Image (tube, coloured by chain):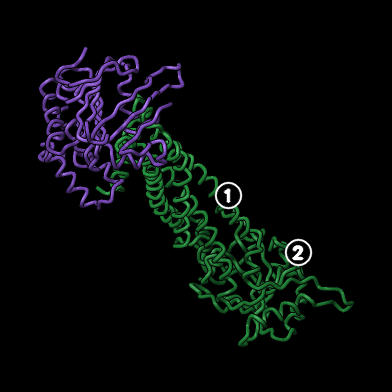
Amino acid sequence: MLFITFVLKNLLRRKARSLLTLVGVGVAVAAVVALVGIAQSFRRSFAELYTKRGVDLVVVRAGTRERIGSSLPEQVGDRIRQVPGVAAVSPGLMDVISFEQRQLIGVPIQGWAPDSFLFNDLRFISGRRLQAGDRRGVMLGKVLAANLDKTAGETVEIFGEDFRVVGVFESFSIYENGSAVVLLRDLQELMNREGQVTGFQVILEDRPNKAALIEEVKAKINDLRDERGRPLGLDALPVEDYVSTTSQIQMAQAMAWVTSVIALVIGAIGVLNTMIMSVFERTREIGILRAIGWRRGRVMRMILYESVLLSVAGAAVGIAAAVVLTRVLSASAEGSRFIEGSVDPGVMVRGLVIALFVGLAGGIYPALRGALLLPTEAIRHE
Amino acid sequence: MSKPPLLRAEHLSKTYPDGQVNALVNVSLAIAPGDYVAIMGPSGCGKSTLLNLLGALDRPTSGRLFFEDKDLAELDDLDRFRSQKIGFVFQSFYLLPTLTAAENVQLPMFEGPLSARQRARKAKELLAAVGLSHRADHLPIRLSVGERQRVAIARALANDPVLLLADEPTGNLDSRTAADVLDLFDLLHRDRGMTIVLVTHGPEVAARAARLIRMRDGRIIAEGQAGAPSA
């Protein structure tokens, strides 16, 4: 008989209790894996919006973390365009709208200039791209179009005005697939932000030492001044910095971690409770094992192995549940806008590591208690 | 008794902190290799306490205990000592209910050097030695009480101890089964030269031993040949 076989048999003795504890750990790990996984995929999708288009810098108003709160004059784009090393600049205005009849809240809407390079990577499922003369025209991402049940040629109401759907597109970005795009001019009018944009996406020239160029251009943009010598208040951020300092991303990650920590504490308490009960019930048995030659360390190992095995089995169940949960969420109308249906293996490994920690944390005290029992008293225990 | 003692107790006393019970008072004795000793006395006379001290399951309040001339008080790993030198047999067998006979016998071997395969083979041999080859894969609940005690004896022998301690080993057995178990002790004593100390309150059990120690109120009151106990 292997030692681990003995440990396993101990767990199988109280099947219902072991199963319930396992499910408890499973739920905790599932919450961690799903939430952290969703937060990561949210962040990845957001970053890909820029990286996949080759955007090197995002320029926003200095000091704003709430990205749609950033506001800059559109003409600043011309100044940025003149900075040596800059290849292309695309101004953009961003906001969120709701389609209440469809219960879609917080749908991103973007205003793009008609000549923007952002159009280049879209594939059209129906209709065509927006052109300079398409006033009151809108392009819908395919997920949004499906949720609204609209296709090219129909109209949708945006901020109380009718917009004609000129095309339905598919983007590489799950985030963009859930959004609407109108011409910059239209969105500025609708939002009473004439001449204003949220920020600029900047592509730099292709040069061997790109990192150095990014730093150089970033410094130059941040240093731009108006005719009276006052700083323009621009903040040019490399994409990675832009994404990681975005408040929604930070919030999603913080929420995921806080929820995870709570789930884990609950998981560890569950394991602790089970193992304390189990050690108490087996007091005499532990005394006997000591009497027939077991050392304290082996009693400790037995109990710790039990709790870790329970937790790791719980993690396996939890990870499987998280994978299913993420798939289900990504298929729902709300979730499909920003959740990808796959869980990153790194997040699964994290779930497993966390379960190991839960097993050790929940097992250490019962293991010590078991190991410190006096054999003669333990054997007398009824 | 020309041989140096295997075990020597000098003025052992044991007081339990709760209620100031003097479980053992100034007990001295020596046990030679190959001895077969019965400790007899009424309930509460301290015989189980003495057995626990001899088996290093507990430490005395005062007095010294030498095993092969080594002072047990100076050993910091009593567990290791117990695991290598002592085999315990209990009145209620104390087999683990979820393990088969063979697996129960293997339990003490986890502290030894054997591989899983060697453990299984040794358990088989030990069960054969107690006449239970055919019951190796049975759970305790499927065994008779006599068989259970024989499994427990096989388990006590798992790490080749030099001293076998038995606390009322026939206390839960009917007289026929008890006789079988005692025959097994006789066999171990005679064929393997095993040193055995058993605690009992049954004279017919004590009669099997070579030496008899009588106890009352925590003290040794008489010592002699088991066949002709001095009153």
Q: Which chain, by letter, is purple? A: B
The C terminus of chain A - image quarter: top left
Identity of the amino acid at label 2?
A: Gly
Tell me the number on the disc at residue A258.
Answer: 1
* Residue A363 coordinates in the image, percent (x, y): 44, 42
* Residue A222 coordinates in the image, percent (x, y): 76, 75
Q: Residues within 10 Å of mark 2 (few under 14, many from 20)?
A: few
Q: Which residue sits at x=38%, y=46%? A: A305
Q: Nearer the viewer, mark 2 or mark 1?
A: 1
Q: Tell me the residue that label 2 is attached to.
A: A63
Q: Colour of chain A?
A: green
Residue A25: name its quadrant: top left
Identity of the amino acid at label 1?
A: Val
* Residue A202 coordinates in the image, percent (x, y): 67, 78
Question: Which mark sits nearer the N-terminus, 2 or 1?
Answer: 2
In this picture, is B203 found above or below A38? above
Lateral position of residue A10 relative to residue A122, left or right: left
Lateral position of residue B225 relative to residue A240, left or right: left
Q: Is residue A14 visible?
A: no
Lateral position of residue B191 relative to residue B114, left or right: left
> Residue farthest to the front?
B2
**Which is more toward the observer, A4 or B56?**
B56
Q: Residues within 10 Å of mark 1 (few under 14, many from 20)?
A: few
Q: CA distance from mark 2 to mark 1?
A: 26 Å
